[in-house]
Amino acid sequence: MSLRLGDTAPDFTQSSTEGEIRFHDWAGDHWVVLFSHPADFTPVCTTELGKTAKLADEFARRNVKPLAVSVDPLESHHKWIVDINETQQTTVNFPILADDDRKVAELYDLIHPNALATATVRSVFIIDPAKKIRLTLTYPASTGRNFTEILRVIDSLQLTEYHKVATPADWQQGDDVVIVPSLQDEAEIARRFPKGYVAVKPYLRLTPQPA
């Protein structure tokens, strides 16, 4: 069964390049980006893992832990990391799960037989500190992920978690946001959004991004 938004992310225990990971314990009170790779020593995955390493400060600033998964064994991962560090001019600073028994792949429905019969597709799960799945993305093996978009979604999820707003199309940090339609009390609106708002339509009210 495929996982849906709001589902609890399945827990697991699996070996990794940074030791055994008991997923829910390892995640703790962090957000997690769990992302899968078709295989080690593949060109697109090499660039993606290098990009993730380079974004370490951006993930840390957002209280996010990245966690990669590939169905190759641990020894292969360690050899691959040498290549990643060399070719991407970085240092891999996050764990890669060695899912050679397909435990995580099966829990997270990462093998799509009509796309790749034996390897995992290029999926992304953003998981919040309550271990709820907040976003899923699945790319074909030929297409590298857009990490600017992944960070943008995390920013939106974290903003909308604590304020009664939603983010419009192409929203970036600092842009106006939308007051959720369910919020109708003008006194509460004035308290929450002291800079006011513009009602383009009764259901479309734009306000500066809350601090």
Image (spheres, grey):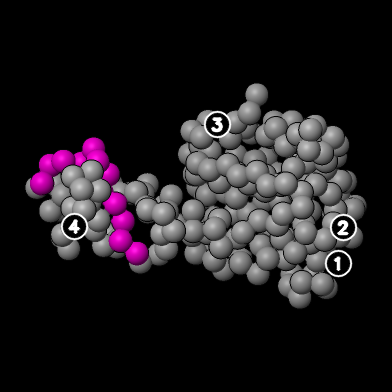
Closer to viewer: mark 4 or mark 1: 4
Closer to us: 114 or 211: 114
Q: Which residue is mark 1?
A: 83
Q: Which mark is residue 198?
A: 4
**Residue that appears at 86% across and 36% down:** 118
**Residue that appears at 21% across and 53% down:** 200
Give the residue type at disc 1: Asp
Name the quarter where the N terminus is drawn. top right
Q: Which residue is mark 3?
A: 4
Disc 4 to disc 1, how far (Cα)? 52 Å
With 85 as the anchor, is 4 left or right in this view? left
Q: Which residue is the extreme one toward the front?
A: 201
Q: Earlier in the sequence, mark 4 or mark 1?
A: 1
Q: Which mark is residue 60?
A: none
Confirm or deny contact between disc 1 and disc 3 (CB under 8 A): no
Q: Is residue 183 magenta?
A: yes
Give the residue type at disc 3: Arg
Closer to viewer: mark 1 or mark 3: 3
Query: In which quadrant of the rendered view does residue 23 lie?
Result: top right
